[in-house]
Amino acid sequence: MKICFCLHNHQPVGNFDYVMNSAYTNCYLPMLEILENHHGINTGIHISGTLLEWLAFNHPEYLERTGELCRKGRMELLTSGRYEPILTIFRRFDIIQQITDYSDYLEQLSGRRPEGLWLTERVWEPQLPSLLSEAGVSWAVVDDIHLKRAGASGMDLFRPCITEDSGRNMRLLGSNRELRYRIPFSPVESVMEKLREMHDAGAGMVLYGDDGEKFGVWPGTHKLCYEDLWLDRFFSEVESAEWLDSSLPSEAARREAAGPFYIPASSYTEMGEWTLHGCQRVEYDELQEQLNAQGRSSVAEVLLSGGFWRNFLSIYPESKELHGRILSAEALVRESESMQALHHFWRSQCNCAFWHGVFGGIYLPHLREAVWKELHKAEWNALGAINGYPFVLTADINADGNDENVIVSQTQSLLVHPDRGLTISELTFLHPDGEPVPLGHVLSRQLEAYHNSIPRAGSSCEVRTIHDDISSKEEGLAEKVSIDRWRRMCFSDLVMPSSKHLNSWIQSDREITHFQEHAFSFSRVISDSFVVFSGEFVDGKLRIVKRMTADLKIPLINTRSDYSVRPFDRAGMEICLNLMTGESPDRFYRIDSGEIHLMSYAGEFHGRRIEVSDCWRKVKTVIEMNCEADVWVSPLDSVNMSESGYESVHQGAAFYISGNADDTGIYNLEISMRMEVL
């Protein structure tokens, strides 16, 4: 029986350098050393573009050794979208060019053009065969569950399967689930017994394809694989087994194939579960439990595929907004013909910050910041190449049926939502050298399925998979769960009864009225120096007349809201900023000339000026009011799951600037906000 090993090594755009170094030391390097020493083991390996470029800069000898294994015929490299995009959510031409570009790079490295592709997060949609074929790909790795959902069974799961789209064929190799769950978590003897069982049943080929990080990065696996010699012993057993022959995946792909099979839109089982939220997830879990109780778990896995990856774009508006901004920037990038702009553009598509499962994903501010920075750098290079400043675009960026306004000057980048109360979500300061500082990219907090089952704090060094129970990294997390009733953006108008207080606002009290989903009318005027918006927003008897001016020369925004509300109601604007962390002493705020407070400090103040200083990214945000106002401040911390445990993550800080209406219900507030180099 042929056994094929295929590993996927990936680090997201924006990951911390110490994390990359740790993964290299604990996983990538020792794995390479073991592969060099076991001459009877052949393997396919996919290294994502982000990681490959990091290796080229920090450890070029690693790539030299990888290339040598490829030239000896003991290893082959798999291609992909260059920086691990979800292939199906970006434009076809762009993805084809990415794959072709990356294949060119890998051919130079290994001396052999890749034939196979590692499918990002195994997200499959039926149009992929024709797209991949056009990009020069002849086979791709999927999970065996993909093939089962297409109707494959029995020995067809142990050979290549053919699919097609528009008459373009594609061969698929299905990674065996039983091996993925056993390697390296079960004893070597148990894995070999399972392989022998497959052989004796008549299997001609079996593929193991999974994340390389399972061999050194996942908890406890470095000790298991290298100190306890699990991997060395396993490869020795495979080499000595006369009934096993290690084969490159491309050799397996050329074997006699089954098919055709047509895979529905799907990914691996856990991804299908993560894409379900709310009542859908509850009903899915209940139905799955019923089938499991009836002994029909295998049927449940095949027929209950869960949700669709693109659901993440509707679950998290921040994800769809990033996706829409990337799509909106493509024409500009291509018009510039700048390869530097194009590569920044591709890096902005790295999938990790778009979704959330057992890995932190979109909840990790540094990952969100990284892809937004790449997008801004792409636009900066492109606009500079074509002398295109200022860039003002009206388009339905978030696919909600209403147009948003993209404004990019040489000093700031904004995404204005006229239909959501004239608010701003994307707020980025652009340094004169082109280094962007995303400040407004705050993630609003929402209910996750796991919030009802957060365990007590605990730690363990035991080997575990993402399918095992996950512990909490600190006590009391269940009590810290907060859900936002409105999106946390800049210049959101909030009105509440005068009896409400700081905690009412912090807890998103239901008596607070926001104007992000209410009747509106607006107009826009563009001049050489300004973009001016005027709007009127109504909720029952509450009415706001609002004016916003975005400066096209300097990083300045002026807003004025005239409130007609109930007598003595509290009314004002909320400004949310993301400084990446709440506890660092180099990021703080002060009201007027008062005491300095860390971004994690909640409190009530009164004044006319707010200074928010980010000494790490070297930018200060100055907010000034036309009169003295109450200033409420609160950190925005989420409670979310990551591979290392449940944790609290700082998503930003909110400043509510407000006052009380007079006895006729009138209150006026004018705010200017500017960003400057610190």
Image (tube, rainbow, N blue to C red):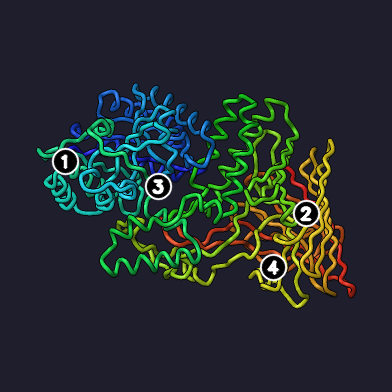
Q: CA distance from mark 3 to mark 4?
A: 52 Å
Badge 1 or badge 2: first in the primary sequence: 1
Q: Tell me the CA gap for discs 2 and 3.
A: 51 Å
Res 623 label: 2
Q: Is 354 on the left-hand or right-hand side of 333?
A: left
Dot 3 or dot 4: first in sequence order is 3
Name the residue rendered at 79%, 39% in the picture.
Answer: 552
Q: Which residue is mark 1?
A: 238
Give above or below for 146 relative to 106. Answer: below
Q: Quadrant of residue 652?
A: bottom right
Q: Nearer the viewer, mark 3 or mark 4?
A: 3
Give the percent coordinates (x, y) of residue 449. Answer: 47, 65
Q: CA distance from mark 1 to mark 4?
A: 63 Å
Tell me: 514 left or right of 37. right
Give the mark, 1 or 4, whose residue is nearer the N terminus: 1
Q: Determine the CA span between mark 3 and mark 1.
A: 35 Å
Question: Going by the picture, which residue comes out furthest to the bottom?
Answer: 499
Contact, CB < 8 Å: mark 1 with mark 4? no
Disc 1 marks which amino acid?
Val
Circle 2 crowding by C-alpha within 10 Å: few under 14, some 14–19, many from 20 = many
Q: Residue at x 65, y 40 (%)?
A: 436
Residue at 74% from the left image edge and 46% from the top image edge:
675
In the figure, is residue 291 to the left or right of 595? left
Callout 4: SS: strand
Q: Which residue bears the numbered disc 4?
A: 603
Q: Nearer the viewer, residue 395 or 559?
A: 395
What's the amino acid at mark 2?
Ile
Image position, residue 22 (x, y; %): 40, 44
| Residue holding disc 3 | 264
Image quadrant where one finds the N terminus: top left
Pair 1/2: label in front:
1
